[in-house]
Image (tube, rainbow, N blue to C red):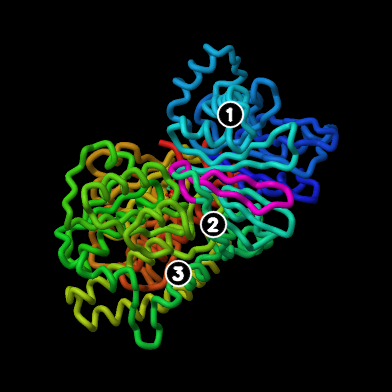
Amino acid sequence: MCGIVGYLGTKEAFPILIKGLHRLEYRGYDSAGVALVDKNGNLNVYKTKGKVANLEDYCRDKDISGTVGIAHTRWATHGEPSDKNAHPHFSQSKHIALIHNGIIENYLTIKSFLIEKGYKFQSETDTEVLVQLIEYVMQEHKLPLYEAVYQALTQVIGAYAIGVIEKDNPNILVTARTASPLIVGIGDGEFFLGSDASPIVEYTKNVIYPEDRQVIKIERGKEIEIRSLDKEELIKPEIKQIQLSLDDIEKGGFPHFMLKEIFEQPKSLSLCMNGRLQREQKEIILSGVRENIDKFAKAKRILITACGTSWHAGLIGKYLFETLCRIPVEVEVASEFRYRNPVVFKEDVLIAISQSGETADTLAAMELAKKQGAFIYGICNVVGSSVARLTDSGTYTHAGPEIGVASTKAFTTQVCVLAMTALAVAKELHTIKEEDYKRIVTELCNIEEKISTILKKTKEIEDISKIFTYARNFLYLGRGFNYPVAMEGALKLKEISYIHAEGYPAAEMKHGPIALIDEEMPIVVVAPHYDMYNKILSNVQEVKARKGRIIAIVTEGDVDIKKQADYTIEIPQTEECLSPLLTVIPLQLLSYYVAIAKGRNVDQPRNLAKSVTVE
Ligand code: M6R
């Protein structure tokens, strides 16, 4: 879960690499480094603990010349964040430098072997064994760099996207991937590497998405060479176009990506529904559902698996599928599912949800269910990601790049895809009345506008947020479709403000959490006006009786909860099954402004990274 960048071409590599690292910093930001072969044939490695800005400072008085280089921003797995554990790593002779995103699972075995051969290690990382192994193979078998990387990788078990350069040949950059993301950009006489397209898009739209177990030689003035670790013959590169613009990856005048992405939600939902929601006919056409309706028809149940925010979207998916399709649904965090020896039937449909499409636990859960014969349906944002490749079918969310570590537009587009999928399945299976279907679809057509209405209340929400920065704990309550929204609101708050928060089904509060309530305790109640309104009103009264401070999310025109709550934020009326798309917006803004008032770095909260590509 790190970011890698590489460049080989005619320009100075350093500025391109640093800009690329800034764009990938969402992937990890505990240390960063760069390696360049300078004009005198020296292989210089500069690396330091901290963010990419620290690396830039550190390099100010260094020789940063060179037209070939690699760079890395790290999220620590093996070895604490430190200068020595930062990438790039040198080989023993300092002739080779390597960057790596992933985990070398058999690194201890390789390390013992190399220690016996006299190799000394400078870091605690798994990565360093790979660069040492490459050097060992190179020296032992008198191989050029590309061949040595290829041979070394045949001995490696694990996940990797790597970039390798050498002192003696500034014309070569070698890269490879297995189970970690990698894109190779092809410009005019220049080549780029990136963990995603963001470091590349400014220079070229032509890219290759290497497959698992492919090793690639990039050589100045030559065509790139691709081989698979499974077959030695050359593979013809398939050049594709990046569907990304620079605007997508810049803040566009907002102080943070998170705020930009909150405000983008009307647009991202519109893109998500584009071509699927037929606004005039009030129809939903999802090819993934149409082509596989037999799978949904024979499914005795649907399994949904995901992590974090995507799991919360999955919990809403359960309410959607059970309500609209009458198919039982089980939702499970992927890290539990994968190790639980779960019962999976061949008739099961497993829906995997992931923004990044690279979450290791979600991928492992999918593989497990696939092996047991389930039909795998993916809901994913990143086109061409590992999740997208592992599915039998699915639907992209088309939210556009989400760079803030805290998921916002990813969540609403996932819920939107789940709603569209459940509606499409229900229609095909005749589990929904035509008038109900049309009414909900009509509401979906209005949802972007309703979100825009809520976004106009930003100042009001900011003012409320400032009152609660004193709090050390928050409780979030919701019922039905909005119980997962309460959990999502709590997650947003804790991950960016570091205030402890719990999301609870409102009625469950009296079985424990009610003991926490006193006059200090803020309780956020998600209470739009539906059938359970009176029940949640009782829950609000229970809180009030214990002097808790209530912030309630209510439907426009609400009377009763307003009388009880200290603060209310109104949202427009919509269909209950779509209400999470609205109720979550004030919670995102609330957490953002609490975190800002506390001076937190909302785009890069401590200890976190955007995609969790390790267990
Ligand atoms: O990329 P994924 O959707 O698979 O990521 C899963 C979680 O790591 C992610 O949703 C995380 O919980 C959020 N970024 C939190 O806001």
The amino acid marked with disc number 2 is Lys
The amino acid marked with disc number 1 is Ile
Residue positioned 31% across, 45% down in the render: 365
* Quadrant assignment, res 202: bottom right
Q: As displayed, is residue 441 above or below residue 260?
A: below
User: Regarding mark 1 in the picture, which secondary structure is present there?
Assistant: helix
**Residue located beneath label 3 in the image:** 272
Residue positioned 45% across, 75% down in the render: 274
Q: Quadrant of the C terminus?
A: top left
Residue in front for this viewpoint, 118 or 403: 118
**Residue located beneath label 2 in the image:** 236
Question: Does the segment drawn in magenta span residue 219?
Answer: yes
Check if mark 2's residue and mark 1's residue have beta carbons within 8 Å.
no
**Residue located beneath label 1 in the image:** 134
Residues packed near mark 2 inside 10 Å, few (<14), some (14 to 19) or many (20 plus): few
Question: Does the segment drawn in magenta span residue 217?
Answer: yes
